[in-house]
Image (spheres, helix red, strand yellow):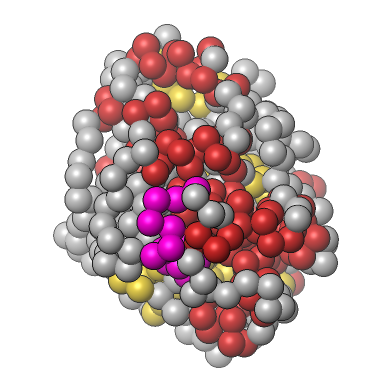
Amino acid sequence: MHANHFVRPRRRSRLALRFAAAALAGATVVSLAPTAVAAGAGTATDSAGSSASSDRHRPSVDLGPELRDIVSRGSSTAALGETRENGRRTWRDAAGVTDLDSARPARADGRFRIGSITKTFVSTVVLQLADEGRLRLDDPVERYLPGVVPNGGAITLRQVLNHTSGLYDYLEDPQFLFHDEASLRAFLAQGRWTNYRPEQLVTAGVQHAPYFAPGQGWHYSNTNYILTGMIIRKVTGHTWQREVEKRIVEPLNLDNTSFPGSWPGIPGPHAHGYVKLPEGPADVTLINPTVGDAAGNGISTTSDLDRFHAALFGGRLLSAARLAEMTTAVPAPMIGAHYGLGLIRYDLPCGEVWGHTGGIPGFNSVLLGARDGSRQFALSFNLLEGTETEESETTLNTFVLRAACGPDTAAAPGAPAAKGADGGPPWTTFKTLR
């Protein structure tokens, strides 16, 4: 969700992957015939697909073949995508099935868990509060959350937002990992219903030594955004969810976007997510999302995400000065990209794109677009966790490159596959839970 490839500093075996990317050996890959959504479900391109554009890197009008490849060759049970240009939809489609039992076609207007794209919403609220003079980005965490973080007086809110705090990622703690089939089964039976308070998640992170001194490196850490949510509550007196809803969701009429707290379901039409077991796929759609909290709790649609991106980069949510701060990015060598304040910048063959990606069990998502807000694309895909292959990576690389750069763009021959923060494809690892 690159011209750059990603280098993982510390690899794990496939039997010890992160909570959000459990992989178990021995299960049978489910083969699904991709199914495009009928026009009545909103899959056909609208008249904007033929509108004039001076940008030679405009999105492909029809990414249907690439979307179907994500399902037929990429180990996903469903995939949903949309592109927009100058405020108008240029393409939307769906492939795969809503669920494996009914085999009903997936819907292009379906909702899905957005994982770490939640971080961009949360960061936007913090920057609005800074615009209002209610906090300062260079204030120490200790000022807002006294005693919560060791060395909190030396860690600024800006460092929390751009992952230069050095704080340990709580999702690296063993309690949030699948180690083997038994631990996966335990998660499916009991673990996924666990209700976490933000303070518990922070404690799980800060009980480990930091990766480095504040400001002396870069390491993706979900702990940073749990703290950010707590700071929003301290400053406003409201939960981060309520502030996101009041400041972003409601003004933009993002009617299909929600931040459900502990509710395990997904409202409205949606594709199911699965993980692999020896006897076949296990449905993991229902999960208590408090494990992600402000780092990855959200639910949305491709249309709502594209409209959010357009509003953010079009200057509707932040002052020009704050948006400039948000897009002031530091090198993120762990993922071969640059990271701003709740935003990732990827450098593609056609130039830079901005946005975020997300992953939570059963769901992966991408939101990227132009810095001037003129173009964006969103993708959700339900990768069958545990069946990932190099071909899965290739199909995703192809979709992202062509969505961002145009239908004739392809990865350079022989170029290594792009890697994300935990060693998988970049658009599957951008953590909520990663």
Whether 189 is drawn above or below 96: the answer is above
Horizontal and vertical percent for residue 24? 33, 22
Whether 108 is drawn above or below 83: the answer is above
Query: Hey, which residue is sitting farthest left in the picture?
Result: 414
161 relative position to 51: left or right: left
Report the residue at 48% width, 42% height from top: 202
Q: Nearer the viewer, residue 302 or 218?
A: 218
Report the residue at 43% width, 63% height from top: 153
162 relative position to 38: left or right: left
Report the residue at 61% width, 53% height from top: 229
Whether 125 is drawn above or below 64: the answer is below
Please tell me in which quadrant of the rendered image residue 176 appears. Answer: top left
Image quarter where the C terminus lies is top left
Please tell me in which quadrant of the rendered image residue 302 appears. Answer: bottom right
Q: Which residues are magenta?
A: 148-163
Horizontal and vertical percent for residue 78? 55, 38
Report the residue at 60% width, 22% height from top: 193
Whether 252 is drawn above or below 267: the answer is below
Image quarter where the N terminus lies is bottom left
Residue 429, visible in the rendered structure? no
Residue 29 is covered by the magenta coloring = no
Q: Nearer the viewer, residue 156 or 180?
A: 156
